[in-house]
Image (cartoon, rainbow, N blue to C red):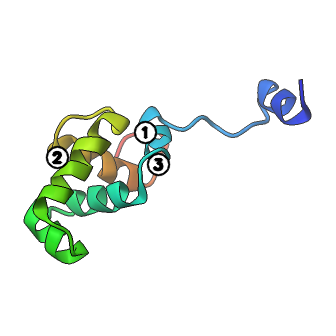
Amino acid sequence: MGPARAGRAAGGGRERASPAHACARRAHPQELRIAGLVADGLSSKQIAARLFLSPRTVEYHLYKVYPKLGIGSRTELARLVVLQKAPATEHGML
């Protein structure tokens, strides 16, 4: 066992990321950019205009990012992004 692994095994490593956060690292930067705009309340048409894409391309990126994040709707996506941006509290509640 290497020193880094031994340190984590002994409790000296970083805390594990949430599953959604870990999956977000596999998402394409454009998917994450679009996800942030969805969380801000923009429609696909508005996002498309802002990013110089077609609305269909925006929808395709959403279609691809939903399974990576383990979600199935714009509402869940917005909630997830807001929770990821929120500061952690002592008891994990906002």
- Residue 69, quarter of the rendered image: top left
Asked whether the beta carbons under mark 3 and mark 1 sit within 8 Å of each other, the answer is yes
Asked whether the beta carbons under mark 3 and mark 2 sit within 8 Å of each other, the answer is no
Q: Is residue 33 left or right of residue 89?
A: left
Residue 90 spot, x, y in % from top left = 49, 43
Query: Which one is closest to the eye, mark 3 or mark 2?
Result: 2
- Per the rendering, the mark at residue 19 is none
Element at badge 3? Answer: loop
Element at badge 2? Answer: helix
Residue 34 spot, x, y in % from top left = 27, 60
Foreground pick, 28 / 5: 28
- Name the residue type under label 2: Arg
Query: Which one is closest to the eye, mark 1 or mark 2?
Result: 2
- Calculate the distance from the C-alpha at mark 3 to the C-alpha at mark 1: 6 Å
Q: Is residue 18 left or right of residue 60?
A: right
Give the residue number, with chain letter if any, for mark 1.
92
- Per the rendering, the mark at residue 88 is 3
Label 3 or label 2, whichever comes before in sequence order: 2
- Per the rendering, the mark at residue 74 is 2
- Name the residue type under label 1: Gly
- Calculate the distance from the C-alpha at mark 3 to the C-alpha at mark 2: 23 Å
- Name the residue type under label 3: Ala
- Calculate the distance from the C-alpha at mark 1 to the C-alpha at mark 2: 23 Å
Please state, as top left, top right, bottom left or bottom right, where the N terminus lies in the image. Answer: top right
